[in-house]
Image: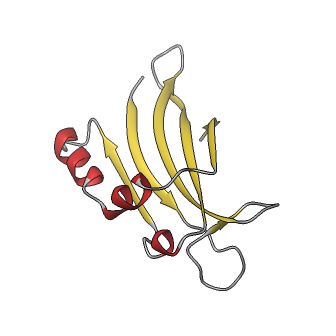
Amino acid sequence: MQSELCLRRRLRPPTSAPSCLTRAPRGPATFTLDLTRQFEVNDSDGDHDHYVQVHCELRYAHAAELQVLGHFESWFFHDGGGDLGRWTEEMVSRAAWTVVRGLRPVDIRVYQEQV
């Protein structure tokens, strides 16, 4: 089983107008920080069957400092030749961490999906 790491900020518009917030089907607009781990699942012959992604979504209430962060997504693949330490340093040095460190999520959602 291979695995990949992802740091993703999902910012979906709550209406058709441009925005950097996520709107739940019922409820206020939120900023979502989605930490994702992807696993490859192989069949009994060792061939690729599908992927499973495990998500930890941290949802924050609307705040101006979050809105300016925009959309960002970054994946690290262990067999991609990159350096995990360097990727991690790049991720933790992003402005988003400074902003969310001082805020408390209004919701945390953990789930998995087959992709």
Look at the picture and state if 49 lies above or below 30: above
- The residue lying at 24 percent from left, 56 percent from top is 93
- The residue lying at 60 percent from left, 84 percent from top is 18
Tell me, what colour scheme is on the image? secondary structure
Look at the picture and state if 15 lies above or below 53: below
Q: Residue 101's spot in the image, x, y percent?
A: 40, 52
Look at the picture and state if 54 lies above or below 72: above
Circle count:
0
Q: Residue 67's spot in the image, x, y percent?
A: 51, 73
Query: Given the current orientation, which residue lies at the most extreme bottom position?
Result: 17
Query: Given the current orientation, which residue lies at the most extreme right position?
Result: 26
Residue 16 in which image quadrant: bottom right
Q: In the picture, which quadrant includes the N terminus?
A: top left
Camera-nearest residue between 47 and 15:
15
Q: Is residue 43 left or right of residue 93?
A: right
- The residue lying at 34 percent from left, 58 percent from top is 98
Q: Is residue 18 left or right of residue 9?
A: right
Look at the picture and state if 85 lies above or below 66: above
- The residue lying at 45 percent from left, 54 percent from top is 8
Q: In the picture, which quadrant includes the C terminus?
A: top right
Q: Residue 105's spot in the image, x, y percent?
A: 57, 50
Q: Residue 51's spot in the image, x, y percent?
A: 53, 35
Residue 70 in which image quadrant: bottom left
